[in-house]
Image (cartoon, rainbow, N blue to C red):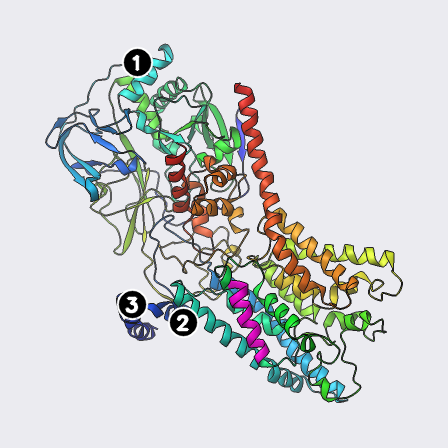
Amino acid sequence: MNWIRQKIDQVKGPFEPGNKLEKYRPAINALDTFLFVPNHTTQKGAHIRDAVDLKRTMIIVVLALIPALIFGMWNAGYQHYIQLGENPAVFEAILHGAYKIVPMIVVSYGVGLGLEFAFAIMRGHEVNEGYLVTGLLIPMIMPIDIPLWMVALSVIFAVLIGKEAFGGTGMNILNPALTARAFAFFAYPTYMSGNKIWVSEASNVDSISGETILGSLAANKEISYNTAEMFTGIIPGSISETSTLCIAVGALILILTKVGSWRIILSGIIGAAVMGLIFNALNIEGNGLTNFPWYQHIIVGGFAFGIVFMATDPVSGAQTTRGKWIYGFLIGLFGIMIRVFNPAYPEGIMLSILLLNVFAPTIDHYVIQGNVKKRQKRLQMKTVKTA
Amino acid sequence: MPTDVKIKKGLKLNLQGEASETFGQAEKSKTVALRPSNFYSLVPKMVLKEGAKLKAGDEVFFSKYSDKTRVVSPVSGTLKEVRRGAKRKILDVIIEADEIQEYKDFGVMDPLKTDSSQVKERIFSTGLGVLLNQRPYNIPANADDTPKAIYISAYNTAPLTGSAEFILKDRVEFFQAGINALTKLTGGKVYLGVDKQSASFLKDVENIEVLNISGPHPAGNLGTLIHETEPMNRGDRVWTVNPEDVAIIGEQFKTGKYNAQRTVAVTGTSAKNRKYFKIIAGAEVKSILKDFEDNSRIISGNVLTGEKVEADGYLNFFANELTVIPEGNEYRMFGWIPFIDNNIHSMSKTSLSWLFPKRKYEVNTNINGEERALVVTGEMEEVMPLDIFPMQLIKACMAGDIEKMENLGIYEVVPEDFALIDYTNTSKIEAQSIIRGGLDIMITEVG
């Protein structure tokens, strides 16, 4: 171990302050800190520090994503083979999925981390670990057949416009991963919606129904999947959003480690259930989505994935405890509402989360204002008493 | 009737290296230092020149902004040196102590039988005033104010701290006299916070309002006590006093002598002789710390709020602890991976250390990461028992937004209330120093 350390210190030599490559220090530091926790000691404030840091926190989110990712790979392969009338082995299915998905992940990380490093060097701060999560999320919410250059463009848009334009990590208003998806969705609608894109290479096979459940419902078609299939996720859809089961495992990891806010997840589910129940009760003529049972609303489409992995993003979400309840609830409520009322956007959750991202600071403002009012009232009481 | 102060939010840190409740023999400190930085915001004007002879209780310097804020010598001897820094700022005033101590005689006074204005006059004219701290801002009390209440906390919930009961057990009489004097300074109450669990003799002290404290740190912080009883508003003034300083004030009233005795608990895993020592406030570190591990950090105060000092330096005037812990200037391979290195305490569930709530941890000064943007939300609230929004207040302080700081409760906090946020926050931001910066802005802009 010591010799590795010595080797690294040797390599880092020219990057030390005062030397030629000083400017590029954040880049080399980012690599170094993945091997070693630095030897920095406290210089002001409390003399001791907790073991937690942002790397640990972000890696937990990546871990929580793994079940959904692996399942997504398998499902991509499985859907591909059954449309050809074949019944693939597990390994075969995963291999096909990996063949499609791994390059997307490589592109997403390559382009995104490249930008992150460039901005860190330009602005002279350390590389933030947030992109480790964003970079994995972006391919996971794309349709399987999306061209790699579109992934790259979406990443560039999300990092530049979604994040760095606002000042970098911690300052962004919108969730970067959803910004990437929204960009692709509006820039290349033919690659992001319709009924041919959800199953790998479906467009090569004629007369195959590769529609998502929501797509079929919006077109008032019968759906051929039962609740168990919806829950386990053996259905067409974006890569990793289909399996509510795997997402629930991820949610459990996030909640147990307290990395994700259980309040947002729970209130989101409640919000979606409430909206679903309202529509079930109304049962509007000619809209197949209104009488789709509320519990199935929660397990199909991007709802589960969105509420667990996107809505809980602490930067773009509400920051106060009470705010989190309201924020989550409204995401669920609006998500189902957009889904039902606007068949052109069957995936309402993405839009709903982005909308609430924008309103999260407003929600927080009113929560905080409550606290401020309490303080002002106390001051008023005091002035009255002394007057 | 004692009032209960019970809080739930916070963190009890169990650390190795407590001091045993016995007294060790301190070496006589040849010199003592009066450091203006120990009296925050005080800009000193010297009364005496280098070489002057003085008794314990003689005035050494006073505040440039109020000549009633006086700092007097804790020992008799010779003013040896005035150490200055940049722009001739006074850093230390070094006094060489005499072999036999001589005390200036202030005369005996029974505060209960004296008019309150005379008691106040005596406290501020004889240099006891700087033992009183003002909230908001945590700066020396202003003689022209009448505080709405006075708070003393005899239950320090921070890790590795001295026990006020042990420190005061032989000086109850002086403590009572000090309390009697303090009651004359305020129109309101004198609150004394004690551990609810203990059968402390301090609960029998007269003329006080006992606050029975229970809960994790920062339950015993003065900020918590004030918040739970009479929360601060804009324009309010509250004074706070260390328990041992109450005894110093009382002794001066009872005997006429200014005896600035400081009882210091030597704690921390790197210190070998972990006991209590009786010394003079501002004494040399080496008078009580000889034997300690190499590569250690010496902290005058506790690990959360103390001041870093050198082995040949001087103790903080007010601190009742001297904590010595290892410097953490070592690399840890793959230490960022979750659930690794569980021997390092973490409040976060990304480590398994929460499975062992009873375990006592050895700590060092490693930051365990690097500073990052503020990303994680909700974690600061978990260690903030006051009804304020910590992250929003920190941001307001960073932005220097006076109106926002006021609205979010800047008057109710001092840096030590944010010490646990320093410790626990994922982004490794320096909350205490940010809050101090915000308070400094308030001092200059609002006053």
x 59%, y 35%: residue: A373
Residue B127 appears in which quarter of the rendering?
top left
Quickly name the residue at label 2. A31
The label number, if any, that marks residue B109 in the structure image: 1
Pick the front one: B145 or A34: B145
In this rendering, the answer to whether B226 lies above or below B16 is above
Pick the front one: A141 or B259: A141
- The residue carrying pointer 2 sits among few (fewer than 14), some (14 to 19) or many (20 or more) residues within 10 Å by Cα, namely few
Mark found first going from the N terminus, 2 or 3: 3
Q: CA distance from mark 2 to mark 3?
A: 15 Å
Which subunit holds the residue at mark 2?
A
Pick the front one: B355 or B81: B81
Q: State the image coordinates of residue A125 (x, y, percent, origin top left).
A: 40, 62
Q: How many marks?
A: 3
Prevailing secondary structure class for the magenta stretch in the rendered image = helix
Residue lying furthest front? A187
Q: Quadrant of the N terminus of chain B?
A: top right
- The residue carrying pointer 3 sits among few (fewer than 14), some (14 to 19) or many (20 or more) residues within 10 Å by Cα, namely some
Q: Nearer the viewer, mark 1 or mark 2?
A: 2
User: Is A153 inside the magenta-drawn segment?
Assistant: yes
Q: Is residue B269 visible?
A: yes
